Image: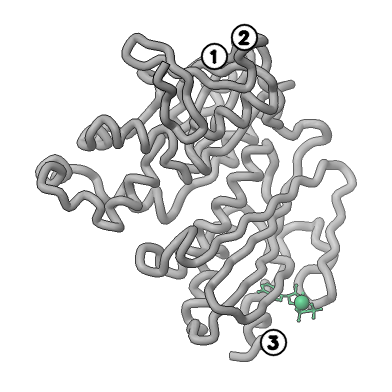
Amino acid sequence: MNEFEFIDSITQGYYRQSSVIKGIGDDAAVLRHPYHDLVTAVDTMVDGIHFSKETVPAFYIGYRTLAANISDIAAMGAVPTSYMISLVVPKDYSDNELQAIYQGMDQLSRKYHMDLIGGDTVTGDQLVVSVTIHGLVEKDKARLRSHARDGDIVFVTGTLGDSRFGLGLLLDEYKDQSYRDRLDKIDRDYFINRHQQPTPRVDFAEALKSLRRVALNDVSDGIASEAHEIAKSSQMTLFIDDDQVPVHQDMYSLPDELIHDYKYSGGEDFELLGTVSEQDFPFVVEAARRHHLPLRQIGYVKDSEQTNGQVYLKKQGTLKRLKKTGYTHKN
Ligand code: ADP
Ligand code: MG
């Protein structure tokens, strides 16, 4: 397939969004958004660093890359509308695999009524997939990390560490005899699916749109990192209670240190970490319930000058500083 045939093969027959004035087929795409704020983000995945052809088939490379982008849009409280793909393709990469990447993206993009409106294709040494996404949010309703306030409740959706556990299973990291028997009964497919086909929390974030203020951040690196980003942007201190941080029951088959590691720095669960006033929290709980999404209060926000920008973890009766990496300080 030459480049023109390839572009033809991935061009949609029609565009789902009325905002697309021109999609694929000119020097640039044209979009019209008179009544909303436009939210845009870019995410790049490199073979051998962000995924490997061994653990992630081409379809899921596409799926995961777009899911990560959609998750960023959800974390702004916006609804995704369109995306562009920049590809670096190795010479020996097959047409079928390339098509499979697009099929993976297409499956998600249909679900969210999004349009592929352009991209760029070049050859290179290793596969790189870069996606630029666009979304819309009501004017001044973007959910910023800087929106946390004194007295807020810290909440998180779903369960944490699932994606990292799924990756471990795919990489056969638990060969040691001490794990073997304990991992006999776990739901392997659940964790592998959480790694390969994560679900961005768009519907839930959109359900919060009537709230005046909520801070949101999606879990891409692990909540230790995302909690710090909120603490720093908002200049607040976050307190997290380890007992409340949600994990899937099968995770308890792992040693305590791994559970801790996966929970706080596993990453790529694409859940949402947020803060909201105590008064609005019941509304958030109800929105999650309507979307059949588990949601837990895991801590609270405090304005205390000396510690603002930091995150504290209460674990086994002691309070320690949680580092961005997920480790705790000795004292
Ligand atoms: P130009 O030379 O004007 O940059 P291209 O030949 O690179 O145009 O691209 C032609 C059209 O195909 C453009 O609309 C571009 O956005 C789209 N396109 C090119 N590569 C891709 C890709 N990998 N995925 C999606 N759209 C693409
Ligand atoms: Mg071009």
Mark 3 and mark 2: span between their CA atoms?
A: 56 Å
| Mark 3 touches mark 2? (CB < 8 Å) | no
Amino acid type, mark 2: Gly
Q: Position of residue 113 (x, y in %)?
A: 64, 55
Q: Position of residue 323 (x, y in %)?
A: 49, 28
Please state, as top left, top right, bottom left or bottom right, where the N terminus lies in the image: bottom right
**Label 3: few (<14), some (14–19) or many (≥20) C-alpha neighbours in 10 Å:** few
Is residue 316 at least partly visible in the picture? yes
In this view, the residue in front, 45 or 83, is 45
Instruction: Provide the residue designation for mark 3.
Output: 4
Question: Mark 2 near mark 1, Cβ–Cβ under 8 Å?
Answer: yes
Residue pointed to by mark 1: 300
In this image, 161 relative to 290: left or right?
left
Q: Label 3 amino acid?
A: Phe
Q: Residue furthest right?
A: 34
Q: Amino acid at mark 1?
A: Tyr
Q: Residue at x 87, y 42 (%)?
A: 35
Above or below 325: residue 173: below
Q: Tag 3's secondary structure?
A: helix
The residue indicated by pointer 2 is 151
Query: Assess mark 3: CB under 8 A from ligand 1?
Result: yes
Sequence-first tag of 3 and 2: 3
Residue drawn where x is 30% and y is 36% of the image: 258
Image quarter for ligand 1 equals bottom right
Callout 2: few (<14), some (14-19), or many (20+) C-alpha neighbours within 10 Å? some
* Disc 1 secondary structure class: strand
- The span from disc 2 to disc 1 (Cα, nearest Å) is 6 Å
- Element type where label 2 sits in the image: loop
